[in-house]
Amino acid sequence: MSMFKHAAEILEARVNTFLNRADDPAQTLDLSYEKMITTLQDTKRQLADVITERISLENQMAAAKRDSDKAEADARMALQAQREDLARAALTEKQTAQQKIAALQQAHDSIATQAEKLTAYETKLQDHIEQFRTQKEVMKTQMAAAAAEVGVSESLSGLGTGLADAGDAMRRAQDKTAQMQSKAEAMEGMAEAGILSDPLDARDSTEKELDKLRSTTGVDADLARLKAEIAAPK
């Protein structure tokens, strides 16, 4: 063996070692698993935010309901005191509270839908991660066994590393394909989760005027009802 050939073989061996470290299939699998865990943690945080918003809306709805009930009681008391002006003002407050409840309920329904989707996605992702973890460990064990077998075979037969390199390249390609499929499934799940709706008032001027008319009509109806109830013989 000439000096130049020996130097070339040493250089080739060092290059192969560097490439194997840079593209280690076991490390690729572990990195894929870590990325999936990160995605799961992000999903949990998003779900926690949505649930917090849902609870906040429920508390606001409960407060608005108390305001509506109080306004009803105040209107009744005002009519009994012959203060129809105060009764009308109280019933106006009641109508405002009821409109607020309706808007909050709409936002709550949207948030609840988001929470259901995120919960379902979280469960699906957890199952997928567990399956991937099991497959990862099995594949790493198989790769270790295959590497040992190749090493023994090379030692016994004196063959070069050409076939082994081809087998390693095939396994790395399979691992990368599995990683891309996992990423695609995660992105599809996030797309199915939808976008959080904005609960802010988006009515135009016409809708606002119509709501105002409905509120006035509701006040008149409530006022007439309370007068009838008070005037009715007991």
Image (spheres, grey):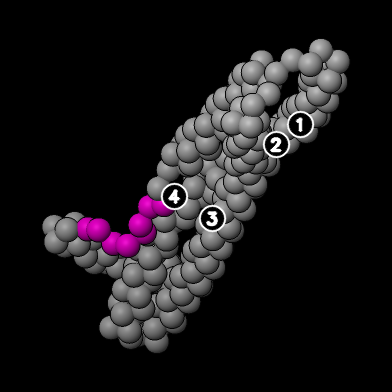
The circle on residue 140 is: 1
Magenta stretch: give its range.
196-203
Q: Amino acid at mark 2?
A: Ala
The percent position of residue 90, horizontal first and vertical second, equals: 36, 78
- The residue that appears at 33% across and 84% down in the rendered structure is 86
The percent position of residue 202, horizontal first and vertical second, equals: 25, 58
Label 1 element class: helix
**Dots 3, 1 in contact, CB < 8 A:** no
Sequence-wise first label, 4 or 3:
3
Which residue was labeled with disc 2? 26
Sequence-wise first label, 1 or 4:
4
Which quarter of the rendering shows the N terminus?
top right
Label 3 element class: helix
Crowding at mark 3 (Cα within 10 Å: few <14, some 14-19, many 20+): some
- Cα distance in 3D space between marks 4 and 3: 15 Å
Label 2 element class: helix
- The residue that appears at 48% across and 52% down in the rendered structure is 111
- The residue that appears at 54% across and 60% down in the rendered structure is 49
Q: Nearer the viewer, mark 3 or mark 2?
A: 2
> Residue 223's quadrant in the figure?
bottom left
**Dots 1, 2 in contact, CB < 8 A:** yes
The circle on residue 110 is: 4
> Residue 151's quadrant in the figure?
top right
- Cα distance in 3D space between marks 3 and 1: 33 Å
Q: Nearer the viewer, mark 4 or mark 2?
A: 2
Label 4 element class: helix
Crowding at mark 1 (Cα within 10 Å: few <14, some 14-19, many 20+): some
